[in-house]
Image (spheres, grey):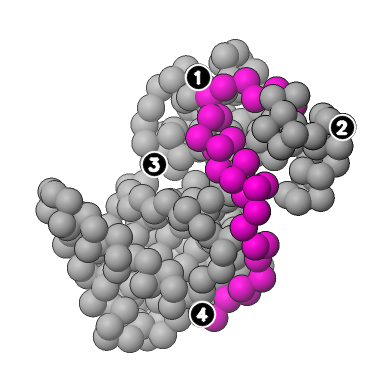
Amino acid sequence: MSDSIRGLRLEIHVARRERMGREWNYSGVVSPFFRLYAIHASAGATVAHTGRTWNLDPQRLHLVPAFTRSDYGCKDHLDHTYLHVSAITGNGQDLTRAVALPAELPATAERLARIERIRVAQDRPGLTARLASDGDLRLLLADFSAGGDQTAVAPDPWSDLATWIIDHLDAPLPLDQLAGRMDLRPSWFAERFRARFGQPPNAWIRERRLERAARLLSDGLRIEVVAGRCGWPDRAYFTRCFARRFGAGPATWRRLRQPGMG
């Protein structure tokens, strides 16, 4: 993997095996985590995202990137193991958006064994199970990255700044404070920041705050708690910003996007 994912943080929200039928039918799903599917048996199960529809096949693993609109359908039956995972890079992006990972990989016996170990480890308390699960997940992501776009930016002070911002999203983060951390005038800092991250500082920070809010809401936290942890002292303003970004208010998102949907 590339230096752009230095400091990668992983969190497994759900690892479960389920057998579904025609009730497995969802439209317009946008998740703050990526979804990884291992298909054990399937008849007429599909997933659509990024402009394409895939048949879910036992011969392949399928990955749906975070914050991607996706549609799910099953005409007969589906037996699958699924993982819901947050994978946040050192500069605050979800890995599946920072690196162009392929949607599918061959479902080799070794990869299926890793997924099964992750599933079993979720029911086992303790550091040993967690570390083993983390290791298996990193190996799976390495397999996906081997077929993806490895283009990335080498680590530099800007990556360190981005990591610091992600750790302080609950704070005001004014432009002059950020510029001071880089020993630059605010106007020059804003120009350099945009060249490095593709957005002005305020827009980039707002996007990271909204992504964090979506993840926290999916965990079931109260809206005012989420707003505070993501730097919005005004709940009403937070609600408007969230609805503009995701097409649904925080309460609706929390109800519909919790990780239980396979």
The residue that disc 3 covers is: 258
Q: Nearer the viewer, residue 166 or 20?
A: 166
Q: Is residue 176 magenta?
A: no
Please provide percent x and percent y for residue 262: 35, 56
Q: Is residue 143 visible?
A: yes
Q: Nearer the viewer, mark 3 or mark 4?
A: 4
Image mark for residue 41 = none
The residue that disc 4 covers is: 146
* Disc 1/disc 4 C-alpha distance (Å): 39 Å
- Specify which label sits upstream in the sequence, 1 or 4: 4
| Dot 1 crowding, Cα within 10 Å, few <14, some 14–19, many 20+ | some
* Local SS, label 2: helix
* Local SS, label 4: helix
Q: What range of the chain is rendered magenta?
A: 147-175
The residue that disc 1 covers is: 228
Residue at 58 percent across and 76 percent down: it is 148
The answer to whether residue 206 is above or below residue 98 is above
* Disc 3/disc 2 C-alpha distance (Å): 40 Å
Quarter of the image for residue 225 reads: top left
Q: Circles 1 and 4: CB distance less than 8 Å?
A: no
Residue at 50 percent across and 19 percent down: it is 228
Q: Nearer the viewer, mark 3 or mark 2?
A: 2
* Local SS, label 1: helix
- Specify which label sits upstream in the sequence, 3 or 2: 2
Residue at 79 percent across and 34 percent down: it is 184
* Local SS, label 3: loop
Residue 198 shown left or right of residue 233 in the figure? right
- Specify which label sits upstream in the sequence, 2 or 4: 4
Q: Nearer the viewer, mark 1 or mark 3?
A: 1
Q: Circles 2 and 4: CB distance less than 8 Å?
A: no
- Specify which label sits upstream in the sequence, 3 or 4: 4
